[in-house]
Amino acid sequence: MDSKVDSNAQRALVQLDVLKLVLDNIGACVFIKDTNGCYTYVNQLVCEMFNRPKEEIIGYDDHHLFSLDKSDDISKNDEQVLKYGKTISAEERNIIAETGEVCFCLAVKKPLLDSTGNIIGMFGVATDITERKRMELEIKQNNHLLDTILSNIDAFVYMKDRNYRFVYANAKTLELFDKSIDELLGQRLDDIVPPESISNFNRMDDQLFATGKKQVGEEHFVDDRGEDKYYWSTKLPLFDSDNEINRYIGFSTDVTELSKLRFQLEQQVQAEIRKRMQQEQRAITDPLTGLYNRFKLNETMDSELGRVRRYRKSSSVIIIDVDHFKDINDELGHQEGDKVLQAMAKIIASHIRAADIAGRWGGEEFLVICPETDLDGAIQVAEKIRKAIESAPIACVKNRTVSAGVAEARGHEQVSHFIGRADICLYQAKRSGRNKVCY
């Protein structure tokens, strides 16, 4: 068994090393932040961007790394993710604090959620688009160089009129559609590819002509082989002499592999979070009944007694023991005994209040913690449980009952003393005939 565990651990370490290697070599900045905006993970490219080791980044927020007073795109986007749970895909203009260098990135940011849907942090992938951004600005300032740039740029470049018909396409775009320039000019996109393959392309075009503003975003395309392709597109409006939009120029870059990798990384991160949450849940759960285990109950009792001491609030505990449980195991076997415990656990869980905490204390004993409850209130809960079990039909077991002991917390006693008093009451219930609650 130990060798198998060691082997699994070694494989897990190898897989972790491979994942780290992938994250350090994907050509994008990958990072995780907590709810305070502090970095909890960064890959190697982030360290290279800031020219700092990881220990000078982990635990710090962006005020330590960027000049946010001069450019706060990153803060605004982080707020949308961490405060409102939105997924952000946007350009960011950032200024590195140490060097004053201005850089642009395409950032995709997504909230990290726990099993209850609460935001516990943020996962992000940022691709450096500084050069592409500078190129766009240069194109805007130097229109007479446009033809030269378009003929050499490593992107899909095209121009459309107000009717969405192509009026220009560079060689890379012609190759994509397998068309000559004569075949493509004057055509709409839905004239040459099935409409269902380009469902969101016209949406960006509509937005551009409606607002007169540059559009930036990811576009999805299904090629003739049925494969998904993703493009990061920037579309710039062009104006006539009357300052009316008469066409636009678009730049699209194939980011299919990056999008797929981003999705895989998001899935891996979410899977790891779910795995850790499951491990944490297993660590505090009794595997037979599904209730809390003794470790969790002790932990909760420590917290409860601390609250009682600080705020002088009431708190009580109920110990429940199955009457004549040994007879069940002897007559029906341990498997049937386990079924009885599972059935009783369900009854207990369904007859306590929302604030109460129930768990398996050990063997055939259960423990119910009743926060902000005095002795009389806890007795009522115990009686409700006792009566429910007495009247419940439990398979193969006739007239099954439980005994219970109840105690209310006292000022500065330890957990063991508190539980011990309830235990004494339980034995009193056993000695006085069972199927009763003593206190």
Image (cartoon, rainbow, N blue to C red):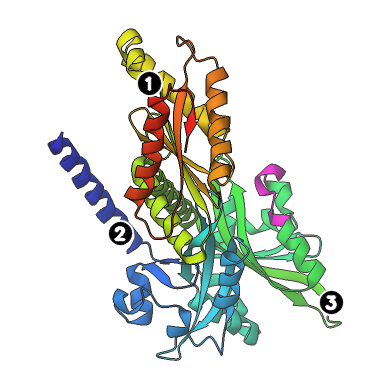
Task: Return the residue nearer the eye: 312 or 50.
Answer: 312
Please name the residue that numbered disc 3 is placed on: 244
Of marks 3 and 2, the one in the foreground: 2
Q: Quadrant of residue 293?
A: top left
Q: Please give the label number shown on residue 23.
A: none
Image mark for residue 20: 2
Q: Is residue 195 magenta?
A: yes
* Residue that carries the numbered disc 1 in the rendered image: 338
Res. 254 in view: no
Residue drawn 61% across the image and 64% down it:
233
The crowd level at tag 1 (other Cα within 10 Å; few <14, some 14-19, many 20+) is some
Q: Main secondary structure of the magenta part?
A: helix
Q: Nearer the viewer, residue 379 or 100?
A: 379
Name the residue type under label 3. Answer: Glu
In which quarter of the view is residue 325 placed? Answer: top left
Task: Tell me where residue 56 appears, x and y as whole percent.
Answer: 32, 79
Q: Is residue 388 visible?
A: yes
Residue 242 on image: x %, y %: 86, 82
Mark 1 or 3, nearer chain start: 3
Magenta span = 193-202
Residue 106 drawn above or below residue 341: below
Query: Callout 3: helix, strand or loop?
Result: loop
Mark 3 packing: few (<14 Cα in 10 Å), some, or many (20+)? few
State which quadrant residue 61 falls in: bottom left
Instruction: Give coordinates of residue 345: x percent, y percent.
Output: 47, 29
Badge 2 crowding class, 10 Å Cα cut-off, few under 14, some 14 to 19, many 20 or more, is few
158 magenta-colored = no
Q: Say which label, 3 or 2, has the lower sequence index.
A: 2
